[in-house]
Image (spheres, rainbow, N blue to C red):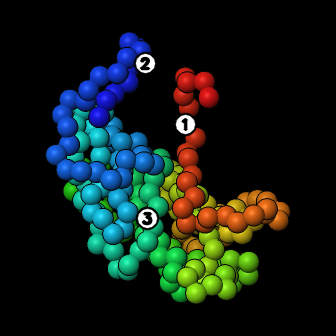
């Protein structure tokens, strides 16, 4: 791996190579001074790269209860979270985990239940043998108080805010009818960060 320096305008090799093969170097999330990559559910090669020390290291993974096919992970408010998603299941109840700051492990932060949303938004139901529901997790917002934290969910043509404290939800935006197919589960959401780079 090479690191680019904006000061010198050049690339240099990182301090130490990672001994294992990593197949997950996409959709990295910066948290706690490191870039994190979470593996595909059927692999256990999640890792992080400490930016200051320029070193790779493995990160532990929680034990999931199901045969998840997707994992949503990200950072918000200084917290690193991970959620399993089982799109080919009738269940819409999931566990959301948070990583301990010292990497000692994950703890269960919230139980998430999307059944009330599916009941209120019939477009979420999909008459398919593979995916009974259509949705994509766009992000998790960690507020100062856990009581105010929420998840943003995309269901057909709508963005919905789901409140962790009481499971209530509100529509944030109605996008109107979509054109073409949307790949709900492989959607990649990118968090806005302030930067000096012109985009």
Q: Which numbered dot is residue 193?
A: 1
Look at 42% across and 48% down and name the residue there.
26
Q: Secondary structure at mark 2?
A: loop
Residue nearest the viewer, comparing 98 with 182: 182
Q: Residues within 10 Å of mark 3 (few under 14, many from 20)?
A: some
User: At x 36% / y 56%, what residue is drawn?
Assistant: 38
**Where is the N terminus found, in terms of image quarters?**
top left
Give how far apart the Cα atoms at labels 3 and 2 are.
Answer: 32 Å
How far across and how far down the image is residue 101, in percent? 29, 50
At 78% from the left and 63% from the top, the residue drawn is: 178
Badge 3 or badge 2: first in the primary sequence: 2
Residue 84 percent coordinates (x, y): 43, 69
Above or below, 32 relative to 62? above
Position of 58 relative to 18 (above/below): below
Relative image position of residue 159 (x, y in whole percent) = 70, 62
Q: Compare marks 3 and 1 and give the one earlier in the sequence.
A: 3
State which quadrant residue 125 falls in.
bottom right
Mark 3 vs mark 1: give the one in front: 3
Secondary element type, mark 1: loop
Discs 3, 2 touching: Cβ within 8 Å: no
Q: Which residue is mark 3?
A: 71
Residue occupying image coordinates x 45% and y 48%: 27
Q: Which residue is mark 2?
A: 6
Circle 1 residues within 10 Å: few <14, some 14–19, many ≥20: few
């Amino acid at each position: 791996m090479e690191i680019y320096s904006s000061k010198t305008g050049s690339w240099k090799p990182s301090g130490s190579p990672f001994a294992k093969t990593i197949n997950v170097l996409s959709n990295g999330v910066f948290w706690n001074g490191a870039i994190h990559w979470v593996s595909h559910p059927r692999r256990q090669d999640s890792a992080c790269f400490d930016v200051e020390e320029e070193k790779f290291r493995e990160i532990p993974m929680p034990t999931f209860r199901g045969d998840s096919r997707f994992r949503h992970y990200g950072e918000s408010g200084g917290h690193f979270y991970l959620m399993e998603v089982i799109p080919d299941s009738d269940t819409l109840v999931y566990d959301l985990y948070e990583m301990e700051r010292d990497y000692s492990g994950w703890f269960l932060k919230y139980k998430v239940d999307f059944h009330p949303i599916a009941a209120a938004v019939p477009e979420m139901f999909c008459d398919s043998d593979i995916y009974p529901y259509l949705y994509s997790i766009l992000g998790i917002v960690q507020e100062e108080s856990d009581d105010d934290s929420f998840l943003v969910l995309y269901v057909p043509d709508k963005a919905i805010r789901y409140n962790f404290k009481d499971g209530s939800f509100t529509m944030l935006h109605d996008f109107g009818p979509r054109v073409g197919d949307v790949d709900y589960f492989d959607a990649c959401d990118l968090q806005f960060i302030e930067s000096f780079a012109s985009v």
